[in-house]
Amino acid sequence: MSRSKRSQKELILEHLKHGDSINPMLALHKFNCFRLAAIIHQLRNERHNIVTKKIEAHTGNKYAEYSLIA
């Protein structure tokens, strides 16, 4: 299936399955996804074991980083 036909959810799940973490900025740049938390919620409802790590940037802003646990 070509990239343009795959959903953001499928692409993000594949990214996580490769052992990579994802955060909102990466999701926006790589997958054009503005609603990462909603997609993570859907994946959790599908029984994917995703953990959230709270990150504080050097600017003091806080954001979530998500990873898949095998």
Image: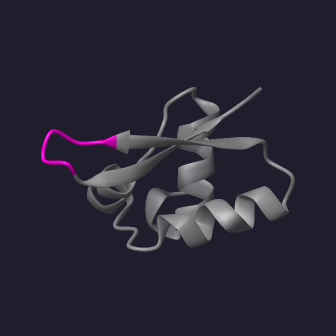
In the image, is 21 to the left or to the right of 9?
left
Is 38 drawn above or below residue 43 in the view shown? below
Report whether residue 7 is seen.
no
Residue 2 point in image, percent of width and height: 50, 57
* Residue situated in front as seen by the camera: 13 or 37: 37
Name the residue rendered at 87%, 52% in the picture. Answer: 47
Report whether residue 37 is seen.
yes
Query: In the orientation shown, which residue stands out farthest toward the left?
Result: 59
Magenta includes 57?
A: yes
Residue 14: name its quadrant: top right
Magenta includes 11?
A: no
Main secondary structure along the magenta-highlighted residues: loop
Residue 44 point in image, percent of width and height: 77, 57
Name the residue rendered at 57%, 26% in the picture. Answer: 19
Name the quadrant of the C terminus. Answer: top right
**Magenta stretch, residue numbers:** 56-60
Name the residue rendered at 54%, 52% in the picture. Answer: 12
Is 20 drawn above or below residue 5 in the view shown? above
* Residue situated in front as seen by the camera: 15 or 42: 42
Residue 58 point in image, percent of width and height: 15, 39
In the image, is 23 to the left or to the right of 36?
left
In the image, is 44 to the left or to the right of 26?
right
* Residue situated in front as seen by the camera: 61 or 68: 61
